[in-house]
Amino acid sequence: MTGNFLNIIKKKIGTYFSPTRINHNLISPFAIEIIETLINNKFDAFIVGGAIRDILIRQKPKDFDIATNATPEQVRSIFKKSRIIGRRFQIVHVIRHFETIEVSTFRSPPQNKVKMKNGVFKDNEFGSIKEDAARRDFTCNALYYDPVRNKLIDFYGGIKDIQNKQLNLIGDPKIRFDEDPIRILRAIRFSSKLGMPLNKLLTDHINQSLSLLDKVPYSRLFDEIMKLFLTGHGVKSMTLFKKFLLAHKYFPALLSPESYEFINQGLVNTDYRILNNKSINPGFLLAVFLWPDVKLAWNKNSKNIHTSTALNEAIDNTLLKQSRIFPIQKRFAITMSEIWRLQPRFENLNPKRVYRLFKHPRFRAAYDFLLLRSLKDKSLTNTASWWIKFVEADENKKN
């Protein structure tokens, strides 16, 4: 009888766990301060989502989100340095120095199932903490932690799934993917990042729902696809990206067998830089993705016209072809073009041209690209070695 009673209570209020594994050293002091302030103003507030998930797997969160029963207007009135943003659903950015914490009000599931132009259901409805948890995508992201009162709430067994390395959607996958198709890409990203294999049920529903991505606005789709490769687990993400035929759909150049080693090494290098807190340029990785097509067209064009003209035509045609499939944002396309156009200049070792190239704003990215090419193309070994010595000599001179 007692056991049944406890199960009923757990279903009603969620499961409370001992927070001994929550390392407060990994939590932003500013986030704790915001929660404490909201509690002092008679509201409930919790760190929610990916931050708690990451702490439980001993990773330092990149940012912190707070969920509360205070409305955006109430949050805004409490914190002077804050602003309300958002159209689909209003949230509050609370700001201190260079840190911004996102504070959102508990939401309820969509009531009228009305879709907006971006293919996502309209959900501008406040709700309870349990309703808010039901709206979240994966069980591992539906964790709520109050660092002031040391309270961890788990409505859907997210902690157990994290322990068992299982990625599970909350609710019916078919319905949840239909509500927001971007969850398909999030499933791939979290599987790669968290080392949680996609089970057969989730895999089957992803395959059945891929066409829904066609309804997602380009800018949102582009950003989410780039997240797959720019969060430090790009190699694993690429495996799933190809498995679900997304490479064929968005970046056919990735499918060239000859380019596998080159692209894989580019992802390895990018993962390394991200995991070691080094800066990255998305344009560089995109240049790696499309280089096989550029190189093929360049070699073909060079048989009939000057090599620099041949390269320019190859670049223009490759970007044009890609734009008809899945356009690259202009700011990244410019970076890609500059990296590609600088490649022939590395082979001219005339002192004046060397220093002119060295002063180019895109030199470092183009130099790294040359070194990456030289790993596969042995004809570039001597050129790459010369430039490595040149760059090292300059760095030693500065030191």
Image (cartoon, helix red, strand yellow):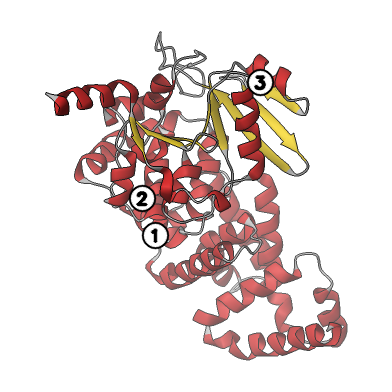
Mark 2 and mark 3: span between their CA atoms?
Answer: 34 Å
Percent position (x, y) of residue 50? 47, 42
Mark 3 is on which residue type?
Answer: Val
Q: In this view, does 287 lie to the left or right of 139?
A: right
Q: Name the residue under label 1.
A: 236
Residue contact between numbered discs 2 and 3, judged by CB atoms under 8 Å? no
Res 269 quadrant in image: bottom right
x and y, in percent, of residue 95 in the image: 73, 35
Mark 1 surroundings within 10 Å by alpha-carbon count, few (fewer than 14), some (14 through 19), many (20 or more): some
Question: Which three-letter amino acid code belongs to the residue tagged 1?
Answer: Lys
Asked if residue 306 can be seen in this view, the reply is no
Q: Which residue lies under the disc numbered 2?
A: 191
Judge left or right: residue 277 versus residue 216: right
Circles 2 and 1 in contact, beta carbons < 8 Å: yes
State the residue position of label 3.
Answer: 75
Image quadrant holding the N terminus, namely top left
* Mark closer to the observer (2, 1): 2
Q: Who comes first in sequence, dot 2 or dot 1?
A: 2
